[in-house]
Image (cartoon, rainbow, N blue to C red):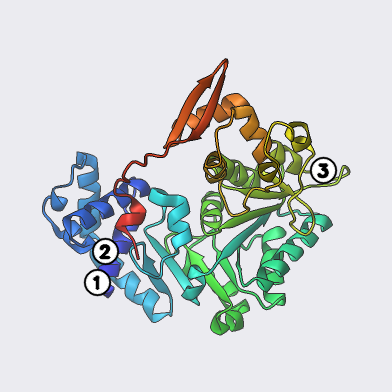
Amino acid sequence: MNQELTYWVALTHTPKIRTSRKNEMIVHCFNEGKTIVDFLESDNFLGMDLKQEEIALLSQTKSELGNYSFMVEELLDQGYEIIPITSKDYSPVLKSNLKYSSPLVLYTKGNKQILQEKSIAIVGSRNANENALLFTDNIAKKASSEYKVVVSGFAKGVDKQALDSALKYKGQSIIVLPQGISTFGSGMKKYYKQIIAGDVLVLSTFHPKSPWSVELAMARNAIIYGLASEIFAAQSDDKGGTWAGVCDGLKKGRTVYVRLPNDKENCANKSLIEKGAIAVDMEGRTLYSNVLESIEEEMPSSIVAEAPASYMSIDERIQELLTKGEYSTRQIVDLLQLKGISSRQLTQRLSKMKDIQINRKGRVNMYSLNASQKPEQLSLDIAFAN
């Protein structure tokens, strides 16, 4: 097993090749019925269509396998675990959310079973105000009572509050590092008891010896969001990691809950809500506007009364609505309260979704779900099914 882990780590840290491209290589191995060892040891890389630059980079990686072997052995001796994307221990939520951008390996220390549990991310500013910290405490308390793992990034402010609150309420937490796992010595000592007890899992996707950097801190945010089934933003500035992470999540169709601030707070939470995030109160309860009142006469009351399912992405909520009948873009926006999304933007979104049927009624396009389903092509999730 150590030999195979060496090849996983070597491919993971091969420079200048995107993670998505590396995952394509892994899927190619799967299709050929071969392993990653077979791939890197093959003279022609199992016949995969590679660019000359990629061949040169992979050949260089093969020449450095000895160094990677020593690093893997050292990590395992120190009690760290290396989890490849094909392992049953790999987070299914991360794989589902990031797909081909999923990191090839996870470096962990602690209770890896936590990766299989329901999870939420609580994110926010390093300079969070009292309301944001109280909100974070409330959400962590509720999550812990529901046996959901709290994912955070170990930064000052909201991240640290999320971790401390989860542990205070006897919950579990994942610390996602902005550095290599072997450089987190002080943190390992501080949370040693919680790690041993199985309440904390420390996780990194970077080279084990990488020091903290702003670049890694920004890249780490995608992993935090990816590990979570639900995302709660306590406080955001109009730039920085929280802002970028929430905007990216909304762009990818993730459902993000943002605390509705009071009028005296200087933050960008309302701007994120206008972009499509769902406003919640201090307890994390969804806040609904009176926008549905104006269309109650047009829609069946049974549909108007339904709140969007909290665990669904925007695309999933749209598809769920379209199973009930056909609707115009304006009706979809209003019924699902897609704040910050115009009818024109929704039209573009619908054009990219599968199994959507368009019926022209007068001057209005009506959308419904096409009953005929197309067979799914081989995806990363299918190839790496646990």
Q: Which of the labelled discs sits on residue 144, or is there none?
A: none
Q: Residue at x 71, y 36 (%)?
A: 274
Earlier in the chain: of badge 3 and badge 1, it is: 1
- Secondary structure of the residue carrying tag 1 is helix
Q: Is residue 28 above or below residue 73?
A: above
Q: Quadrant of residue 206?
A: bottom left
Residue at which label 1 appears: 3
Which image quarter holds the N terminus?
bottom left
Most extreme residue toward the right is 264
Residue at which label 3 appears: 266
Residue at which label 2 appears: 7
* Distance from the alpha carbon under mark 3 to that under mark 1: 53 Å
Q: Are marks 3 and 2 in contact (CB under 8 Å)?
A: no
* Distance from the alpha carbon under mark 3 to that under mark 2: 49 Å
Provide residue 345's location: percent of width, then percent of height: 57, 28
Q: Residue at x 41, y 51 (%)?
A: 99
Tag 2: Cα neighbours inside 10 Å, few (<14), some, or many (≥20)? Answer: many
Q: Residue at x 49, y 24 (%)?
A: 359
Q: Are marks 1 and 2 in contact (CB under 8 Å)?
A: yes
Provide residue 299's location: percent of width, then percent of height: 68, 35
Earlier in the chain: of badge 3 and badge 2, it is: 2
* Distance from the alpha carbon under mark 1 to that under mark 2: 7 Å
- Secondary structure of the residue carrying tag 2 is helix
Residue 202 is at least partly visible in this image: yes
| Depth order, front residue of 92/201 | 92
